[in-house]
Image (cartoon, rainbow, N blue to C red):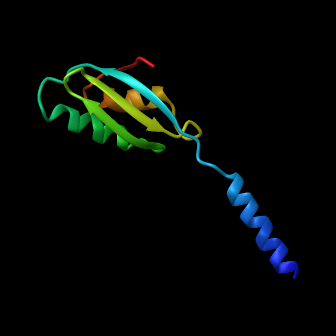
Amino acid sequence: MGGMALAGAQFSQTEVAEVQQATARFSVDNMTCATCPISVKKAMLRVDGVKSVEIDFGTKTAEVVYDPAITSPETIAAASAGVGYPAVQTS
């Protein structure tokens, strides 16, 4: 019976541990052709903690969903800049 109580405690702990999520939007410079957004997306997705990246080539923007406990908008922007596409957080 003591084992069941322990198992119950572990379940409760797992239930409390919830992944945090935030969204950041960036203006991305130097995207001049249809393949540029692919490079930006790949660079941003390589950042630990980034969950998803959506690029809008028409508006030259990126929307990134990430775990703020693992990474920051500054780190994500630096990854984009590192492959030649400077990104500035807009929200």
Specify whether 21 is left or right of 51. Answer: right
Residue 32 screen position, x and y as percent:
13, 23
Seen from this angle, which residue lies furthest left?
33
- Point out residue 69 in the picture as x, y percentages from the top left corner: 59, 39
Q: List x then y, in percent, for residue 62.
A: 33, 28
The residue located at (25%, 19%) in the rendering is: 29
Q: Residue at position x 45%, y 27% from top?
A: 24
Give residue 43's position: percent from left, percent from top: 31, 38
Image quadrant occupied by the C terminus: top left
**Looking at the rendering, in which quadrant would you find the N terminus?**
bottom right
Residue furthest right as drawn: 2
Residue 9 higher or lower than 83, as above or below? below
The residue located at (24%, 22%) in the rendering is: 60
Left or right side of 58 for 69: right
Q: Relative to residue 19, is residue 91 depicted above or below?
A: above
Residue drawn at x 59%, y 47% is 19
Name the image quarter holding residue 21: top right
Image position of 65 (left or right of 45): right
| 28 vs 75, nearest the viewer | 28
- Total marks shown come to 0
Compared with 69, 9 (above or below) is below
